Amino acid sequence: MDIIRVIGLPLACTDYAGAVEWILAKASAREGAIAVEAANTHVAAMFRHDEAFKKSMDRFDFVVPDGMPLVWSMNLQLDSGKRLKDRVYGPTLMLETVKATEDRPSFRHFLLGGKESTLEKLSENLLRDHPGVEMAGSYSPPFGEWPADENERIFAKIVESGANLIWVGLGCPKQEHWIAQNKDRLPPGVYFGIGAAFAFHAGEVSQAPQILQKSGLEWAYRIAAEPRRLFKRYLVHNSLFVWYWLRDQARND
């Protein structure tokens, strides 16, 4: 699998099928904690701009292109026969992974993060749509600062559940920092920084129409839906992504 760097971030040249195959192979092996990220322009800009975030992302084993601007940037560096036809969108990757583990009890899923009500709805929806999947457990950690023993509590719950596919929805960048900082202590399994997928699949937040997703305009839809929370994030980090990308192109010419 080729790795292409976009403004420094190493991205795997893969599609959903290739990503799921890689993930399930690692989950089956249970050889330590494996970190997976579906990266958009926000993640890429933070990787370039924020040294602490870069250090965390450097500990991730597998980063796939979640945003279409990343796919377009990768394709400029790839031969025509290897160019990607689509992104690997985090929420869809979650569903594709769940679907691939139906009626395969050796794969067990654990949901970490979000409100208890969100986790309940999410579990119900996944089991309804994929009745053969093994939902091993879920946990909603405290909001804000965690007590000193919180990590140990989380580790114990994951071990007790027997999960080897752990979906971490703590929000970016908290989930990336948490996975990276605890990677050497986490129970064996594949850990995903999955962001808004919990709210999407629990039915609490609507996803952008496919035409906007394919056009790289999902950010506009999300700003319109949650302007107070997301406007600054997208304005700053989308602008930084474009600036870094243009600067890299000028240096390479």
Image (cartoon, rainbow, N blue to C red):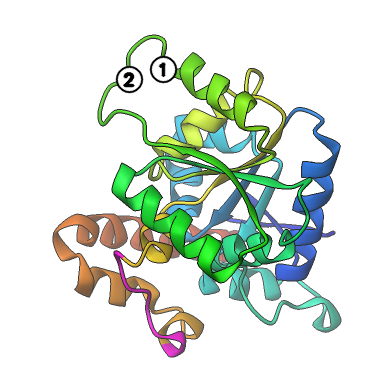
Residue 210: image location, x then y, percent: 46, 86
Q: Residue at x 34, y 62 (%)?
A: 239
Crowding at mark 1 (Cα within 10 Å: few <14, some 14-19, many 20+): few
Residue 34 seen in this snapshot: no
Q: Quadrant of residue 202?
A: bottom left
User: What numbered label is drawn on residue 150?
Assistant: 1
In the figure, 250 relative to 159: above or below?
Answer: below
The residue sitting at 20% across, 65% down in the picture is: 226
Q: Nearer the viewer, residue 76 or 207?
A: 207
The image shows residue 135, relative to residue 148, as above or below, that is below
What residue appears at the point 32 percent right and 73 percent down from the top-left corner?
206
Image quarter (top left, top right, bottom left or bottom right) of the N terminus: bottom right
Farthest residue, direction bottom:
211
* Spatial separation of the CA atoms under disc 2 and disc 1: 6 Å
Label 2 close to label 1 by CB (< 8 Å): yes
Quick one: SS at disc 2? loop
Q: Which residue is under mark 2?
A: 146
Q: Which residues are magenta?
A: 204-211
Identify the secondary structure beneath mark 1: helix
Disc 2 crowd rating (10 Å Cα; few below 14, some 14-19, many 20+) is few
Residue 117 is situated, as x and y percent measured from the top left of the image, at 30, 49
Q: Is residue 245 left or right of residue 227?
A: right
The amino acid marked with disc number 2 is Trp
